[in-house]
Amino acid sequence: MSRPGLWDAVRGVVRRDLMLAMRRPSDVAMSVFFLVIVASLFPLGVGPEPAVLKTIAAGVLWVAALLACLLSLGRVFTADYLDGVLEQMVLIAQPLPVLVVGKVFAHWVVSGLPVVVLSPFLGLQFGLDGEALWTLVLSLLLGTPTLSMIGAIGAALVLGVRGSGLLVALLVLPLYVPVLIFGAGAVTGSMAGVGGEANLSLLGACLVLSLFFAPWATAAGLRIALE
Amino acid sequence: MRGERRLFSNVNVTVQPGTVLAVVGENGSGKTSLLRMLTSLLPPEEGAILWNGQDIRQLKEDYSAHLTYIGHLNGVKDDLSAIENLTVTADLTGDQHSLPSVQEALESVGLKRRVHHLPTRVLSQGQKRRVALARLWLSTHPLWLLDEPFTSLDTAATGLVTERIRLHLQSGGLAVVVTHHEVALPPEVVQQLRLNG
Amino acid sequence: MSFNWSKFSAPLAFYPVAGKMIPWFSVAAALTIAAGLYVGLLIAPTDFQQGDSYRIIFVHVPAAWMSMFLYVVMAVWAGVGMGLNARLSFMMAQAIAPTGAMFTFLALLTGAMWGKPTWGAWWVWDARLTSELILLFQYAGVMLLRTSIDDMRRADRASGVCALVGVVNIPIIYYSVQWWNTLHQGASVSMTAAPKMATLMLVAMLLMTFGFWMYSIAVVLGRVRCVILERENLLAWNKPSPAPEVAEAQS
């Protein structure tokens, strides 16, 4: 009888999900295209005037990133739930919350990281430059993993439930609000010249908090879904 | 309970090493739920499940480290090949996962080499079930919990799996199997539990 | 004297107890709310800044407080249910949610009613109103999650986790929304900057809050009785009589 080491188990979980993502690169592409489309809708709705766009840039880009994350939540656990891989994961002889962190990390690499990488280009489209652009990237780098971790809680709670797409949005968006406030606030602050450090450190705090607490809630949600 | 319905009560049974408990009963009598209780995925309303005298709810990971569970769902990713699936699964359960042993396991369950590297998406139901069951050839865990393992299998494969279970019992392992079929093993190692719905 | 609470933890045992308590709380509610309204609407002095329209505060503020208290109480019941595996605790949580949501909505409605004469707008994005709005979404989430899941046990636990996660979010939302308000200056309207409290006004507020508590308890007890009936009936309907015995295992 043998059991895997903790690090081996987490690495195994991450490896499997990244292998699967490589077989379906369209998943990565979807997040990217969605972000671009949503961000493009706003100038179309509001008008192309640069001054206006610059004012709304921080909020629009952050909301677009948030929505992209929200839409990707259906892919964290659902496939594994349907083919039986999830119940096997719960039975691995290592603490489930740690395995959850691994899973969410892999999910972030596929759905969140592309958003971070693409954001400066979108920022330029909205007339952001210099420090504001850098703050945007940094805020998303801190924020998107937090959104993934928090979103996983909702994803776990609605597994297999009908109407789960909209339901998960309702559950998760109130939890996203603080991250949105701090993230967009960082960019706005740096544009206004007061710097984004205060908001960025709050974002960092959110990330740390979510890393500690969200996995427990997610693990509880997964066990409930599998009963 | 399933939903708000009581499935069964007053189940008292002990499984000794070297024996298999065959759980039989009609559809809806709660066989799968009972098995899932043994995996600790489903907590019982009343009563306790003991492993070597200790409650599995206290043991948690120390208990699941001792078991191999193959349920209705295969636990196999469609986009990965049989070899990849088995390698990752065995790695995650702490079993042997070197390439030769994985290939040997797949061959032992009757899957020819030429399908080992295909994505399991293209395999038939029976072949996918075999990929799932190949874990039994790699498992080093004493307790096997199997839910309808022979579904979708032809006679030959059923024979292979039954034989593997027999060897497992012989080396001191134990098993709980939910099944419609007769378990083709000597009666002295088979204990039957019938659930009445 | 030790009181054996566990006697009442079976839902059917609690049903008559709840029934006996309701009339007391209803009367207490009616009396204190009437008193509160009397003091607030008729006796408390007219505010020199806002005139008589400020009086809506006697409903708005207690309603906002109740919306938050009730969420916490709901989360506590859910937590107790998960810890003790007690169905009645989950039923209490289930019964509290609609009342909490109602108070949240009332707070939002009265907030709008206050905003119009005072600042000329039906809605202002001030810290409290925005937090209340998000709280309403949280209530909606807990309730919709429960109704979307058919399996009662799973519904209990899932909405329990949702409520517990949400209760952690409440202070975070409160402070982050205040932060957001200060970031975007120009928000000089604030409902938290209520008129200076004359003693009578304070008395009215406290009376109303107490009255709302009594009302909540009465209504929740009434609702939990309905929930008990609904769920226990479901149980009885499906129970084969008697519960199936299992044939002894044969070797």
Image: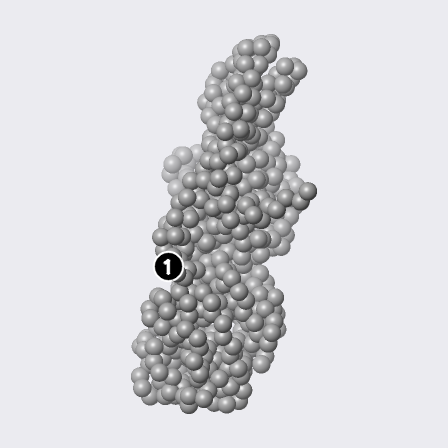
| Above or below, C195 relative to A132 | above
Q: Residue furthest right?
A: C1
Q: Residue at x 50, y 63 (%)?
A: B44
Q: Residue at x 45, y 54 (%)?
A: C154
Position of the C terminus of chain C, as image quadrant, is bottom left
Left or right: residue B112 compared with residue A90: left
Which amino acid, by three-letter code, is at mark 1?
Answer: Ser
Coloring scheme of the render? one colour
Position of residue A91 measured from the top left corner of the image (x, y, whole percent) = 52, 69
Position of residue B60 measured from the top left corner of the image (x, y, whole percent) = 58, 67
Q: Residue at x 40, y 85 (%)?
A: B161
Q: Which residue is mark 1?
A: C241
- Residue A128 or C223: which is nearer the viewer? C223
Position of the N terminus of chain C, as image quadrant, is top right
| Above or below, C131 relative to B86 | above
Position of residue A25 measured from the top left corner of the image (x, y, whole percent) = 41, 63
Q: Residue at x 61, y 39 (%)?
A: C171
- Asked whether residue A195 appears in the rendered view, the answer is yes
Q: Quadrant of residue A23?
A: bottom left
Under circle 1, the secondary element is: loop
State the count of labels: 1
Position of residue B128 measured from the top left corner of the image (x, y, whole percent) = 36, 77
